[in-house]
Amino acid sequence: MFSTRYTFIVTAGLAILVGGAILSPAGLEAPARGQAAAQPVRTDAQKLQGAWRIVEMEFDGQKVAKEELAQFKLVFKGEEVTYHGRLVSRGNELSYAPGVSTFSFKLGTSQKLKTIDITLENDRRNVGIYSLEDDTLKLCVSYVNERPAEFSSKGKTGVEYSVLKREPQ
């Protein structure tokens, strides 16, 4: 039996019970006493939102010095990613240079490796793969439009591999 204190919304053949319990086609399910209702499942795009610091980076197999990494930051907001800092080559070393650039991004999760496409100016696209576990994000992005098959830039040209940690809010 249903109590009158609940309100039902029926749409597209599904009923949702508003007021603490959920009515699905299979029946009524309510959280157990003392337990909170289940949290909604967040998408990877939602989990990416916020600021991330690069803690490890290599480009074309060459590692970037840790002291250079402290200045890099990526911020995901909506469907855009803003890069704070850019990687430049100074002699035989890779280092930080100031600059801020914002691009759109799109995630793909239907393949074995999760994919990310970053659209630059003039609709140019960098393609990559990503892994997201808790507060750790791994990105491997190709600047030559051949999607990486692994999280490494060793032996490759135009490929950047980074490990990022979420900044505390």
Image (tube, rainbow, N blue to C red):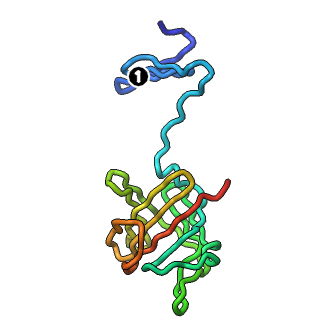
Compared with 33, 111 (above or below) is below
Residue that protrudes farthest toward the top in the picture: 1
Q: Residue at x 58, y 73 (%)?
A: 100
Q: Position of residue 76 (x, y in %)?
A: 54, 59
Amino acid at the residue labelled 1: Ser
Q: Position of residue 107 (x, y in %)?
A: 41, 56
Q: How many marks?
A: 1
Q: Crowding near pointer 1: few (<14 within 10 Å), some, many (20+)?
A: few
Q: Position of residue 148 (x, y in %)?
A: 35, 68
Q: Residue at x 57, y 68 (%)?
A: 54
Q: Is residue 123 visible to us here?
A: no
Residue that protrudes farthest toward the bottom in the picture: 91
Q: Secondary structure at mark 1?
A: strand
Compared with 30, 123 (above or below) is below
Compared with 162, 114 (above or below) is above
Q: Which quarter of the figure is the C terminus placed in?
A: bottom right
Q: Residue at x 37, y 21 (%)?
A: 25
Q: Nearer the viewer, residue 102 or 161?
A: 161
Q: Is residue 125 visible to us here?
A: yes
Q: For residue 60, what is the image quadrant?
A: bottom left
Which residue position holds label 1?
Answer: 24
